[in-house]
Each structure stands twice: as C-alpha cells, then as structure tokens.
Image (cartoon, rainbow, N blue to C red):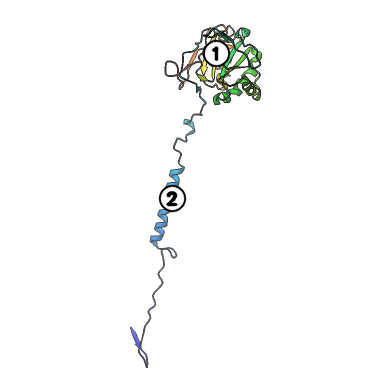
Amino acid sequence: MTDAGPSGPPRPTFEHRPEKRGLIGPFSGRQLGSVVLVIVIAGILLVAVTTPLGSTDVSTQVNPQATAYLLGPATVGLRPGSLAPELAGVRADGTAWQQLDVNGRPVRLADHRGRGVWINFWASWCAPCQAETPTLRAMDQQYRSQGLDVIGISVKETTAVDVGAYARSYNLTYTIAADLTGDVFNLYGIYALPTHVFINPNGIITAVVNGPLTVAQATAYVKAILPGGPTASGAPASPAASPGQPSAEGGSVSRPLPSPART
C-alpha cells in the first residue's frame, strides 16, 4: 500500500513485524534438540568405556596367587613315604659328585638326622621364588630353634658367587647351595620352581610341593616335620589337592598338606 505525497510519486508504507524469537533465547527447538542428542550420545559412550568388563562384586573375586615356573614337562619325581636321596652320587660316566654350599662345604642330609629338613629348589631369576624368599627366611628364623633346617638349592644358575650374593642381599642365614651341574636337580626329578621337599627327622619325605607357598601353608608343612610333630615318626602328611598344576599323569598335582593348627 502506498501513500501519494502532495507533489510527488507515492511512497511505500512500512508494516511493523515482531522479531522472531527461539524456543530458548536465540536457539530454536531444532538446535536445542541437536544439542540434547549429542549429550545423550556422549553419555552412552562414557558409560560404555568406563564400565568394567569383569565383575566388581568383591565377594566373588579371588586374590591372584603366584604359580610355579615350569622348566619342562611334568615328571614322576620323589614320592612321600620314600627315603630322601643323599645329596651325592656317581654320574653315568663314573665320576662322583657331592653337593656343596656356596662356601664350599659339603651339604649332607645325614648331618641333619633328628631334625626336620625343608629343601627348597629355587633360582635367583625365578619371580615366584623371589616373592617367596621372605617366607622361607621367616620360617627359618622362627623354627630353627625348634628343630628345622632349611636348605636352599639354587638351580640353572651361572656361578655360585651370584647365588651367594643373592642370599646375602636377602639376609638368608640358612644353608644355600648352587647346583651348577644339575646333579641334584636330576636326582630329585625337579621340573618346576620353586619345588619344596619336606623331610622328617628320620629322613623320610613327607611332602613334595610344586609352586610357592603362603605363610600359612609353609607353617603347616614345617610343624608336621619338626621333632615330635605328627609326621616325625615317618608317616607322610595327609594329601590335599591343589588344582591347576600339571602332574606326570596329567591333571593336578596332589600336594600332601597337613591341616594347619587351629588358633
């Protein structure tokens, strides 16, 4: 619509139109919907990447335990109830051998008759053995005066000097030997580290254990072989299955484990 001026062409008329406003401020509904959709998608992705894959129920979780370091296939070694072989012998080529400690002194089981003997086969490079070292040290310190002798025989090492240095670094005061030739290793049929052989005061093997021991397990085995203990007369400890470790027959190794004393 135009208005004619008094002396000139008609002028256009102006109409006032209200300014368009968004749903919220300057933002339209479509823009707000897009923002909400992005936030929802981001939230879903955040939940997906932060949700644990396993169960978080602490009642169903099991503490991880160290396992034995396998050196080869399982073999039939010494059995509970048999006499522990002396740490000496004659090789196939006719040469005699005698196990020595890191100071060059002979290690003879005959010298430990009348006391319980715990032979620990280990290696300085074996992680489960390293983790178990404090347990052996504590058992030696606690039960030596009660008739326990601990003999640590390191295998698959380069020199006895290295083994002795390891023992000093951990303040191990029990007998430490280095089986550099593998004579004791083969005699006792060792295929895993650590391996524990528990021998009663009469020289009879009461238990052979493949794999690291907890303090509670070590305490039970040690108490069983102390003079006057339940296996001191020669009877092997009662067996208890330990799943997950291969035996010579396949399946699980049977660990003769005495029942821990109740407190």
Amino acid on which the number 2 mark rests in the picture = Ala
Q: Nearer the viewer, mark 2 or mark 1?
A: 1
Mark 2 packing: few (<14 Cα in 10 Å), some, or many (20+)? few
Residue 212, x across and y down, in percent: 54, 22
Q: Mark 2 points at which residue?
A: 42
The image shows residue 49, relative to residue 239, as above or below, that is below
- Which label is found at residue 183? 1
Question: From mark 2 to mark 1, how far is it between C-alphas?
Answer: 65 Å
Residue 137, x across and y down, in percent: 63, 21
- Which label is found at residue 60? none
Name the element at disc 1.
helix
Residue 261 visible to the viewer: no
Q: Is 155 or 249 nearer to us in this picture?
A: 155
Q: Is 248 or 258 nearer to us in this picture?
A: 248
Mark 1 packing: few (<14 Cα in 10 Å), some, or many (20+)? some
To which quarter of the image does residue 4 belong?
bottom left
Residue 19 visible to the viewer: yes
Q: Is 244 or 225 nearer to us in this picture?
A: 244
Amino acid on which the number 1 mark rests in the picture = Asp
The image quadrant where one finds the C terminus is: top right
Q: Is 156 or 83 nearer to us in this picture?
A: 156
